[in-house]
Amino acid sequence: MKKITLQKGNKYSICSCGISQSLPFCDNAHREYNKKNETNYKSIKITAEETVKVNINSSTWNIK
């Protein structure tokens, strides 16, 4: 689990595939992975309506 701060008005792309080098944020690594493995991973888009701290996690992430 990662604790992150989302800043009001900013747009974020959150990783859903687990291979991003900048977890929990997406670095578009899923694009090449999707081509090679015939998968359909996409990032999750978030726009913060206010500045807030959130805990975020995914079963595909291998965060220590």
Image (cartoon, helix red, strand yellow):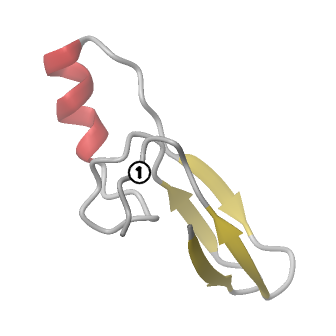
Q: How many marks?
A: 1
Q: Residue under circle 1? A: 61
Q: Position of residue 18 (x, y in %)?
A: 36, 47
Vertical order, 23 against 37 (above or below) = below
Residue 35 sits above or below residue 2 on the image: above
The residue most toward the top is: 38
Looking at the rendering, in which quadrant would you find the N terminus?
A: bottom right
Residue that appears at 59% across and 57% down: 57
Where residue 12 sits: x, y (%)? Answer: 57, 66
> 4 and 10: which one is in front?
4
**Most foreground residue, 26 or 23:** 23
Which amino acid type corresponds to the residue marked 1 in the rendered image? Trp
Check the picture and name the quadrant holding the C terminus: bottom left
User: Foreground: 19 or 45?
Assistant: 19
Q: Is residue 9 left or right of residue 17?
A: right
Say which residue appears at 26% left-offset and 11% top-offset: 38
Considering every residue shown, the one lying at the far right of the view is: 50
Residue pushed farthest front? 64
Neighbours of disc 1 within 10 Å: few (<14), some (14-19), many (20+): some
- x and y percentages locating residue 53 in the rendered image: 74, 84
Give the answer, above or below, for where 50 lies relative to 63: below
The answer to whether residue 17 is left or right of residue 31 is right
Occupied quadrant, residue 31: top left
Q: Going 73% across and 76% down the picture, which residue do you hit? A: 54
**Helix, strand or loop under label 1:** loop
Q: Which residue is at 62% across, 68% downward?
A: 11
